[in-house]
Image (spheres, rainbow, N blue to C red):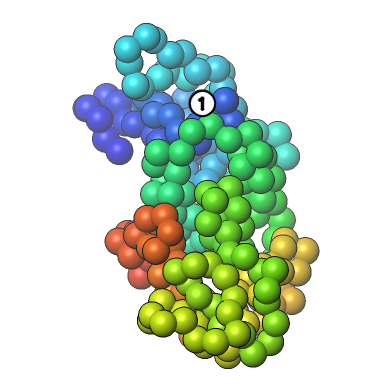
């Protein structure tokens, strides 16, 4: 976000401090352009953060690309990166530093540039589902069996339909089991239509709204709904 005529603010996630705000030069110099390129949505970079007592915005020096994590270049990957940056900025707004979650995110995001387009098309679904573990809202799969209902409010499977509307019938409840099995290694093998992906995404958005925060106002949501055929 533009902060002044000479400065922009980049919101980032760091392993050491969690959510941080970084002041970057908004000018047209070669160095300013290089830094901004490193800090595009889901860009992974390293540097030395300079934090002053009482200030929420830090300055960063020695900024460089994280080794082994090249930026995403494909059009599909760029859309997924934009959407996930939007998603993470919302769900991690008040989250304290979490080394295990950071390691998960850095490992998965760092692999994006090496994934085929078929895998990238499902990448955001995997991240949204698996983030539930770190946010404390992961569905309980211990009672899953074909033919059971999924009670979205209680985050568990039941033999009989719950006495409220926040539930998935047995046909749709299988979606939860499918999502739980998504991993980087099998993303490309899961063949879904755009309608299927949007249905999965809608169910997850409803689930997050019940247990964590609403995601319906994400600016990039309409774009990610349209991009995959």
Tell me the quadrant of the picture where the N terminus can be found: top left
Q: Is residue 174 above or below residue 133?
A: below
Q: Residue 3 appears in which quarter of the rendering?
A: top left
Which x, y percent locates residue 127? Answer: 58, 58
Which x, y percent locates residue 167? Answer: 46, 79
Residue neighbourhood size for the residue with mark 1, other residues' Cα within 10 Å, grouped as few (<14), some (14–19), many (≥20): few
Image-based side of 140 in relation to 195, left or right: right
Image-based side of 112 in relation to 13, left or right: right
Tell me which residue sits at (68%, 87%) in the image.
146
Residue in the foreground of this view, choosing between 175 and 144: 144
Image-based side of 24 in relation to 106, left or right: left
Which x, y percent locates residue 91? Answer: 43, 49
Which x, y percent locates residue 228? Answer: 51, 76
Q: Residue 53 appears in which quarter of the rendering?
A: top left
Tell me which residue sits at (72%, 61%) in the image.
184
Outermost residue, left side: 5
Residue in the foreground of this view, choosing between 160 and 221: 160
Image-based side of 26 in relation to 152, left or right: left
Outermost residue, right side: 185
Kindly identify which residue carries mark 1. Answer: 17
Residue in the foreground of this view, choosing between 110 and 24: 110
Q: Is residue 187 visible?
A: no
Tell me which residue sits at (68%, 77%) in the image.
144
Determine the secondary structure under disc 1. loop
């Amino acid at each position: 976000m533009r902060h002044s005529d000479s400065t922009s603010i980049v919101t980032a996630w760091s392993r050491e401090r969690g959510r941080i705000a970084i002041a970057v030069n908004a000018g047209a110099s070669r160095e300013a352009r290089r830094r901004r390129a490193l800090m595009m949505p889901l860009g992974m970079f390293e540097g030395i953060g300079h934090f002053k007592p009482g200030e929420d915005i830090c300055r960063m020096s020695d900024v460089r690309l994280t080794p082994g994590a090249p930026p995403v270049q494909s059009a599909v990957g760029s859309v997924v990166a934009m959407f996930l940056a939007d998603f993470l900025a919302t769900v991690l707004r008040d989250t304290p530093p979490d080394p295990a979650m950071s390691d998960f995110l850095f490992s998965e995001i760092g692999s994006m540039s090496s994934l085929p387009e078929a895998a990238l098309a499902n990448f955001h679904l995997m991240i949204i589902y698996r983030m539930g573990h770190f946010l404390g809202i992961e569905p309980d799969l211990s009672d899953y069996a074909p033919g059971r209902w999924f009670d979205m409010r209680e985050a568990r499977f039941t033999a009989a339909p719950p006495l409220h509307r926040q539930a998935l019938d047995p046909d749709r409840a299988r979606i939860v089991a499918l999502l739980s099995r998504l991993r980087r290694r099998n993303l490309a093998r899961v063949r879904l239509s755009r309608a299927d992906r949007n249905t999965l995404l809608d169910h997850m958005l409803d689930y997050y709204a019940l247990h964590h925060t609403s995601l319906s106002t994400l600016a990039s949501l309409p774009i990610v709904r349209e991009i995959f055929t």
